[in-house]
Image (cartoon, rainbow, N blue to C red):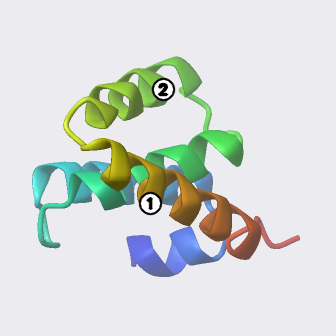
Amino acid sequence: WYRKAAEQGDASAQNNLGVMYANGEGVPQSYSLAYTWFSVAIANGYQDQSRAISVRDALATKLSPPQLAEAQKRAAQYFEQYQPRT
């Protein structure tokens, strides 16, 4: 359900999906996808910006430069694709 809500632009669900990927809860652990979803949540106005930014930045240190670049590219694509529906 978090993925469905995240894909409909819900910033809270996007953040929660980032948490799930970071911890490997219900999905395979992926720091890259966690970074992506946190970035999208932040860009879509997630209410606890400072916490999300802190977690996202910590995840960045776990990624190699190519992995980080790919996660950032994916975040930009997801941001365009998964905007809040009004």
Quarter of the image with the C terminus in it: bottom right
At label 2, counting other C-alpha atoms closer than 10 Å, the crowd grade (few under 14, some 14-19, many 20 or more) is some
Decide: is 86 above or below 16: below
Look at label 2 and name its amino acid: Ile
User: For residue 70, which numbered disc appears in the image?
Assistant: 1
Tag 2 secondary structure: helix
At label 1, counting other C-alpha atoms closer than 10 Å, the crowd grade (few under 14, some 14-19, many 20 or more) is some
When asked about the image quadrant of residue 84, the answer is: bottom right
Look at label 1 and name its amino acid: Glu
Where is residue 76? Give x, y as percent.
Answer: 65, 59
Name the residue carrying label 2. 53
Residue at 43% from the left image edge and 76% from the top image edge: 3
Residue at 44% from the left image edge and 56% from the top image edge: 71
Q: Relative to the observer, which residue lies in front, 59 or 9?
A: 59
- Which is more N-terminal, label 1 or label 2? 2
Residue at 14% from the left image edge and 71% from the top image edge: 26
